[in-house]
Every structure is written in structure tokens, then in C-alpha cells.
Amino acid sequence: MAIQSFGLGKIFSDLYTVFLFTQSDIRLALIPVTLFAVAAAPLSSPLRLIDTVLWIWLHSLQCDVANQIKVLDEDRINKPSRPIPAGRITVHDATILRWALVPICLAFSALYGVQLTFVSLLMLLFTAWYNECDGDKEPLSKNVLTAIMYGCLEMGGTLVAARDHTQLSLTGQIATGLTVAVFSSTLHAQDFKDADGDRQTGRRTFPIAYPVISRIAIGLAIPLWSILLALMWELDILSATAFVAYGCFVGTRFMLYRSGLDDKRSCKYYSTWFSLHHLFPAYWYYYHGNNRHPSLAFVEHILNGFIVV
């Protein structure tokens, strides 16, 4: 009995260690990407939700493990509770896990067809580019690569959730493209809270390279994206007003409140704002169905504005 208890305890401890690799991504990746997949697919059946979450989590895990092996010195300062700096797993064992996840992710994706396997392969290649090929060294490439990987998560999750695993709907394609654009231009909102640790490890991020411009950029980008997204998805006046007001609040916080504690709180508000817009494809389907597509509706708005003028 003692041996069995020890064995179960070790298994649960190892599973918890694996979970800790992705803990920080639950709020910004797992939950919003799952919501996006369910909304953009739309979900073919309730049981498919389990597969969708598992696919998203596995691909987030392989990306997180690869990244946390590389940024060990940074994590010792900024995130000492992560598995490697906390001593729950060695770098050697984490490296084995990192490369073992590659065939696991590909094999799981292959169950759903060629298209999902291709998305999985793209995710793996961009992960290697970001980590092993030092794509995270420069602010611009860091933001763009992270946004592309996030888009791969959304495409993959949506394909798993959908009844048809071979293609995304036009609405899903537009929504994914919007997310990549939004994330690549606002991603550095997460870097403000880690600036001190990044600076000590020699890492260059937008808040370090351009401390003033980066705050102005995020302060303007979030409200502007809020307005654009509200128009693009044709939100009703109440929802649009609330979303734009919240975006203005988040952007203003980053410009006015600049302490480490303030930046951590602002980052949480940003995560909520970023998650909210993942629900807009569901809003579109509910109110507009497949009669029109968001991009065409937005063009109509622009043309109507010119006509009025």
C-alpha cells in the first residue's frame, strides 16, 4: 500500500509539474483560444470541447517548455515559481519533455487530418524559430512570432472543434487574422511587468528599448483596436460602448501607472480585454449568421461613411 501511495504521489506530482509549465498561459492562451475555437467553429458537439482543450493545451505546453528552458536566468528573477527554477524538474529532463512533445502533438493532430497536422507542424517550426533560433531576441520578431504562434493555436483549436476538420470558415479566417494583428501590436503589454528582470538578463523588449514610446503605443493601440473590433463585428451600441470604454481604461492605465505592481495589475486588465474580443465571432454568428461576413460588413460601413460625407 505504501509503495502504491508513493507511486500515485509521484505521478500526481509529475502531472502538477507539467501543468505548472502552462499555468501562466491559462488566462491569456488556453481560455481565450478555447472560447475563440468554440465561437469561430462553431463547436460541433459538447464532447468535442475536450479534444479542443487538449489540443490547445498540448501545443501551448511544448511552446512553454521550450521557452522556459531557454529563459531560465530570467525566470529565476521574474517567475521563480516555475518548475525549473523551483527545482521541480531539471533542465535535462525538461529538454527530453520538450522534444517528446513534438511527435505527440503531430500524432494527435494527424487523427484529425492533413490540414490540422500542417497547422501543428507550423506551430512546432515557429516555436523552434522563436526559442532555438533566437527569434525572441529582438522586440519586433518576438512580437510577430508570438502572434503567429497564437494564430496557429486558434486555427488548430477551431479545426478540432468544427464539424469539418479540413477548412476554416471565412469568418474564422477573418477572426484569426484579426487576433494575430491585435496580439502583434499589443503583446508588449505583458513585458512591462517583467522589465526589471529582462534588463538584468540582457533581454531586449519594447518597454526596455523604447520605454516612453512603448507606453504611448499601447495606450493608443488598445482603444483604437477596441473601436475597430466593435465596428468590425457590428456590436450593439451598449456592448460597443462598454468594450471601447474598457479598452480606453486599460490603455490609460499603462500610460499613467508605471510601477511594477501597477504594471502587473494592468497586465491582468489587458488579459481580460484580449479575452473578451475572442467572443465576438460567437456574437456575429448569433446575430448575423452566415448571411454576411465581418470584412464585407466593415467595408460597407466605410463606404457608407464616405457616401454620407
Image (cartoon, grey):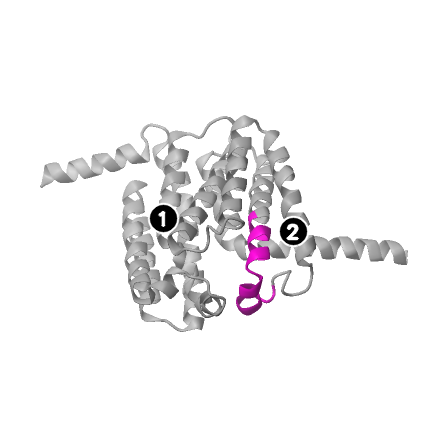
Q: Does residue 127 lie above or below 2 as drawn?
A: above
- Residue 63 visible in the shown view: yes
Q: How many neighbours does mark 2 have within 10 angstroms: few (below 14), some (14-19), or many (20 or more)?
A: some
Q: What segment carries the magenta color?
A: 63-81
Q: Are marks 1 and 2 in contact (CB under 8 Å)?
A: no
Q: Looking at the image, which residue is at 50% across and 66% down?
A: 201
Report the front residue among 197 and 112: 197
| Distance CA(mark 1)–CA(mark 2) | 32 Å
- Identify the residue under disc 1: 182
Q: How many numbered marks appear? A: 2
Disc 1 secondary structure class: helix
Q: Amino acid at mark 2?
A: Thr
Q: Is residue 257 left or right of residue 65?
A: left
Q: Main secondary structure of the magenta part?
A: helix
Frontmost residue, 133 versus 178: 133
Name the residue located 54 percent from the left edge and 69 percent from the top edge: 77
Q: Which residue sits at x=45%, y=39%?
A: 39
- The local secondary structure at tag 2 comes to helix
- Left/right placement of residue 166 relative to residue 91 reads left
Q: Quadrant of residue 12?
A: bottom right
On whether residue 91 falls in the magenta region, the answer is no
The residue wearing badge 2 is 95
**Amino acid of disc 1:** Val
Looking at the rendering, which quadrant does residue 67 occupy? bottom right
Horizontal arrangement in the rendering, residue 148 relative to residue 120 (left or right): left
